[in-house]
Image (spheres, rainbow, N blue to C red):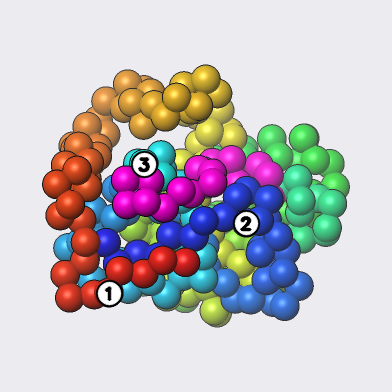
Amino acid sequence: MGVPIYDVTMDETVDWITRWIAHRGPAQIVTVNPEFLMRARHDLGFLTALRQAHLCIPDGIGVVWAARRRGFRLRERVAGSDLVPRLAQEAAVRGWRVFLLGAAPGVAEKAAAVLVEQHPDLQIAGCYAGSPAVEEETAIAKRISQSQSDLLFVAYGAPKQDLWLDRNLHRTGAAVGIGVGGSFDFIAGISRRAPRWVQRIGLEWLYRLMQEPKRWRRQLALPHFALLVLLGLDRPQGQPTETH
Ligand code: UDP
């Protein structure tokens, strides 16, 4: 569908991020699931942002499934919601400064407090709900730049968070930026992630739908995506198929 998904494991993703932070980036990471791909089919700006990102990780089980149907075996599903706590642990050990941008007011602070409780050495450079509105982004980028952060998590949901990073990461001074969706809500205990066994059998999306039934309209993208893959209609028009 024109988006290069990398066959990386969680450990390899952390290695790449470690290297980018050492070299000061800036590098943007995108956690791709079928909703992203379906959105990108009719949103050229989003497609471009995904194609320009330094690393697209296979966040959704649907992506792993679709790749397998095309003969590419992705070794792992690397969920953004697992990556955030893992990077917090790594940040505490390596001394990276972390900035949490987005989610409802107070949630980033709460998530940061939970992470610091788990990793007392973790350095939080800042927390700010802000808004993804274009009028605010210069002030927000300045705030992040002044915080001297290495790693920036942005929780505005897709596509806003990824477009925000595409436009602004370079002026925040952060070496690595990642759109993390509902991760702060999970860490802060505002929403609950599916139990591990539900994740293992590939039904986290269904659990999330049951927890937040208002997502049904968005999640219609999933059966639509599955149908396109099954019918072989998922190939990008006029673009070469890429493998990485
Ligand atoms: N969010 C926000 N501002 C917005 C839209 C969303 O701060 O304008 C936050 C929302 O509070 C939540 C996060 O973005 O914490 C992720 O939202 P969503 O569940 O839609 O994202 P997903 O996990 O599906 O990518």
What residue span does the magenta drawing correspond to?
Answer: 68-87
**Outermost residue, front direction?**
71
Disc 2 CB within 8 Å of nearest ligand 1 atom: no
- Image coordinates of residue 176 in percent, x first then y, are 61, 67
Is 100 within the magenta? no
Of labels 2 and 1, the one closer to you: 1
Residue 60 drawn at (x, y percent): 41, 43
Q: What element carries label 3?
A: helix
Q: Can residue 58 be seen in this view?
A: yes
- Mark 2 highlights which residue? 13
Residue 170 x %, y %: 54, 79
Q: Is residue 54 left or right of residue 51?
A: right
Q: What residue type is labelled 3?
A: Trp
Count the numbered circles shown: 3
Residue at position x 24%, y 75% in the image: 239
Identify the amino acid type marked 1.
Pro
Q: Is residue 165 visible?
A: no
Q: Residue at x 83, y 59 (%)?
A: 95
Picture layout, residue 215 above or below residue 37: above
Which is nearer the eye, 42 or 231? Answer: 231
- Name the kind of residue labelled 2 in the image: Thr
10 Å neighbourhood of mark 2: few (<14), some, or many (≥20)?
A: some
Residue at 52%, 56% (x, y): give it: 7
Say which label, 3 or 1, has the lower sequence index.
Answer: 3
Q: Residue 65 carries which label?
A: 3
Residue at numbered disc 1 = 240
Q: How far apart are marks 2 and 1 (CA)?
A: 26 Å
* Spatial CA span between label 3 and label 1: 21 Å
- The earlier-in-sequence mark between 3 and 2 is 2
Q: Give the structural element (helix, strand or loop) at label 2.
A: helix
